[in-house]
Every structure is written in structure tokens, then in C-alpha cells.
């Protein structure tokens, strides 16, 4: 059974930072691309970042240069460092197994990130 558990969200002021974590189990983590997506209030799910098994990363234009994805294959952990946060970054953040897609079969329960002054 695939389980993804996100943590690390919270309430921060604009310009602040957070580090999100995702613990994966039941996944062939070492060979899987992993993706971060988010759902802003009242909006659809949107892609944030993907990190390949090799560690190669890609980011959406809205977060590039501010967010950084990383992974620990031995611990089956996925991370997303969020820097210089903006109000528009407010969303529920999820980790997902696989590359960017229209639909994710495996998605965690999410962790809420709220940016507010």
C-alpha cells in the first residue's frame, strides 16, 4: 500500500521560509520521480516541482528561484524548501508519485501553507 505523509506546513509572513517533508512508503522510491503539487484556495491543483530519481529538478515559473526540491532515497523522504514566500503561495501542498500529470493515483493528505502578514 502506497502511503505519502506530508508535514512542515504552517503560517508565515511574506518573505518567510518553510521546509515541507513527505515520507513515502510502499513506493519504489529510488526509481520513482516525485512531484510536489498545490491547491490554492478555490483553485485547481497546480504543479509546483518534480524531482527525478537522479535528483534532477524542475519547477513551475511561479516558484523557480524560490523553492528547492530534494530527496533522500535511503530514507524515502522528499523535501521542498520554500523561500521568499508570497501570499499567492498560500495553498495545500501535496506530494505525489511520478512525473507531472493531469491525474495522480497516489497523493498524500497534504500540508497547509498560509502566507499572511
Image (tube, helix red, strand yellow):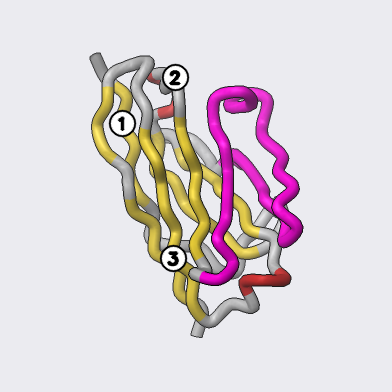
Most extreme residue toward the bottom, as rendered?
1
Is 72 inside the magenta-drawn segment? yes
Residue 72 appears in which quarter of the rendering?
bottom right
Sequence-first tag of 3 and 1: 3
Label 1: which secondary element: strand
Quadrant in which the C terminus is drawn? top left
Identify whether 38 is placed above or below 61. below
Kindly identify the residue that appears in the image at 72 percent across and 39 percent down.
Answer: 58
Q: Are marks 3 and 1 in contact (CB under 8 Å)?
A: no
Q: Can you tell which of label 3 and label 1 is closer to the viewer?
A: 3
Q: Are marks 2 and 3 in contact (CB under 8 Å)?
A: no
Label 2: which secondary element: loop
Relative image position of residue 41 (x, y in whole percent): 39, 34
Rate crowding at label 1 as few (under 14), some (14 to 19) or many (20 or more) other CA atoms within 10 Å.
many
Kindly identify the residue that appears in the image at 57 percent across and 37 percent down.
Answer: 68
Q: What residue is shown with label 1? A: 114
Rate crowding at label 2 as few (under 14), some (14 to 19) or many (20 or more) other CA atoms within 10 Å.
some
Identify whether 92 is placed above or below 89. below
Rate crowding at label 3 as few (under 14), some (14 to 19) or many (20 or more) other CA atoms within 10 Å.
some
Q: What residue is shown with label 2? A: 84
Amino acid at each position: 500500500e502506497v502511503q505519502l505523509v506530508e508535514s512542515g506546513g504552517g503560517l508565515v509572513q511574506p518573505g518567510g521560509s518553510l521546509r515541507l517533508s513527505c515520507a513515502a512508503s510502499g513506493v519504489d522510491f529510488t526509481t520513482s520521480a516525485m512531484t510536489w503539487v498545490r491547491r490554492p484556495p478555490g483553485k485547481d491543483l497546480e504543479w509546483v516541482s518534480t524531482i527525478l530519481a537522479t535528483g534532477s529538478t524542475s519547477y513551475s515559473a511561479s516558484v523557480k528561484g524560490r523553492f528547492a526540491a530534494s530527496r533522500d532515497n535511503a530514507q524515502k523522504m522528499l523535501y521542498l524548501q520554500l523561500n521568499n514566500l508570497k501570499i499567492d503561495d498560500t495553498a495545500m501542498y501535496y506530494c505525489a508519485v511520478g512525473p507531472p500529470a493531469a491525474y495522480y493515483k497516489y497523493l498524500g493528505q497534504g500540508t497547509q501553507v498560509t502566507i499572511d502578514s
